[in-house]
Amino acid sequence: MKIRFSIVFFILFQTISAQVGGERIYNFLNIPTSAPQAALGGETLTINDDVNQPLWNPSTISKFMDNQVSVNYVNYLTDVNMGSATYAHTINRRFGTLHTGVQYINYGEFIGADEEGVETGNFGARDLAISVGYAYNFPRSDFYAGANLKYLSSKIENFTSSGAAMDLGLYYYSDLRPYSFTAVIRNLGYQFSPYDEQREEIAYDIAVGASYQLSDVPLKWHFTINSLQQWNIAVSNPSNDETDLEGNTSSEDINFFQNAIRHFVIGAEFFPEKKFNLRLGYNFRRAAELNLTETRTFAGVSAGFGLQMGRLHLDYAFTKYHPVDNSSTFTLYIDLTRKGF
């Protein structure tokens, strides 16, 4: 098999996206492709009026998403581009609403080389996921249970891989309560066909989330605790290495609190029910792992806004997935139930 030097960059990219070592496949499933999600920290589970939210939490699927369409684009890193499209339709009052979505990532072009370092031409790499989801509202209650089924496909040059995954969610939400909470298991799955002979594990995640709407202030908080399946998620940041007078270098010593706080993501929506709103988020793990000692990187911070214009709704998010590069996410919603503009 030919050795392709550019695969090293691909592996490093997978490590960045996983943020816990890049040890599993299909890590692109854990990168937000919608602007509201990205602006609120990247892992919010309690957005209840967004047709993109079921990609992260299928139990949020409801009749209020009927005939809602969304397309999303992410200018990720260098020439890596991501996107998604979602749609929901209520079959009938008795059955409920079905949700479908497509996620993709294009890693751009790479330079191939053989064992001697002789270039063999350019090649590409991409990942793709197609999902179908449904949520059930338990009779005479405010609890919802939902599930997504996903078909997964990946290609690196002429090597391909495919698999399937499932999301499971339980959600409590009531119009009469200022709070909601949820528990989600994402990306439980199996790789049907590996790139080579050895199968890899899919990057699954177990998380809980909550939101709270303040009564006298137009502000809604979102809280997420992720990676519950793995307590120790901290990775030493080389920027925090220390060197003594004898030239010996020691890695960062991560204590209990520093590891615990990396499980948390916080987001805030200002004017959440208005036609114009603002969003802020903070991802503690991203902030710790992308921090540079002598440079202010604003790692972990995300921000965005939304603007509704008739049947159209535009959203934008600014995030940092790398200390020296910025990422922008654009989302367009179309309400097909409304006539005219």
Image (cartoon, rainbow, N blue to C red):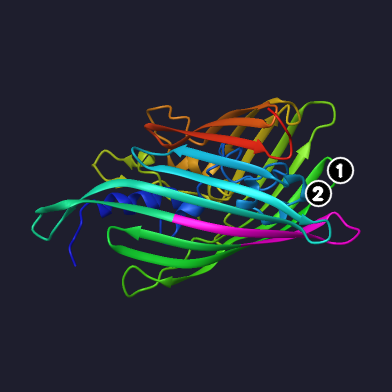
Check the image and name the residue furthest to the right.
Answer: 140
Q: Is residue 14 above or below residue 35?
A: below
Which corner quadrant of the image does residue 295 belong to?
A: top left
Residue 245 is situated, as x and y percent measured from the top left of the image, at: 26, 38
Residue 266 is situated, as x and y percent measured from the top left of the image, at: 63, 39
Mark 2 crowdedness (10 Å alpha carbons): few <14, some 14-19, many ≥20: some
Residue 141 shown in magenta: yes
Looking at this view, is 44 or 132 the one in front? 132
Q: Which image quarter is the C terminus in?
A: top right
Please give the residue where the numbered disc 2 appears in the rendered image: 173
Looking at this view, is 207 or 2 the one in front? 2
Please give the residue where the numbered disc 1 appears in the rendered image: 177
Which corner quadrant of the image does residue 35 belong to?
A: top right
Residue 316 in view here: yes
Disc 2 marks which amino acid?
Answer: Tyr
Q: In the rendered view, does 188 fall on the left or right side of 107?
A: right
Residue 132 is situated, as x and y percent measured from the top left of the image, at: 61, 59
Picture residue at 80% right of the left edge, 32% below the top: 214
Q: Label 2, secondary structure: give it.
A: loop
Disc 1 marks which amino acid?
Answer: Arg
Q: In the rendered view, does 15 fall on the left or right side of 129?
A: left
Q: Is residue 228 above or below residue 65?
A: below
Question: Number of labelled discs?
Answer: 2
Separation of residues labelled 1 and 2 (CA atoms): 8 Å
Residue 250 in view here: no
Looking at this view, is 193 or 327 the one in front? 193
Picture residue at 61% right of the left edge, 54% below the top: 100
Q: Main secondary structure of the magenta part?
A: strand
Residue 169 shown in magenta: no
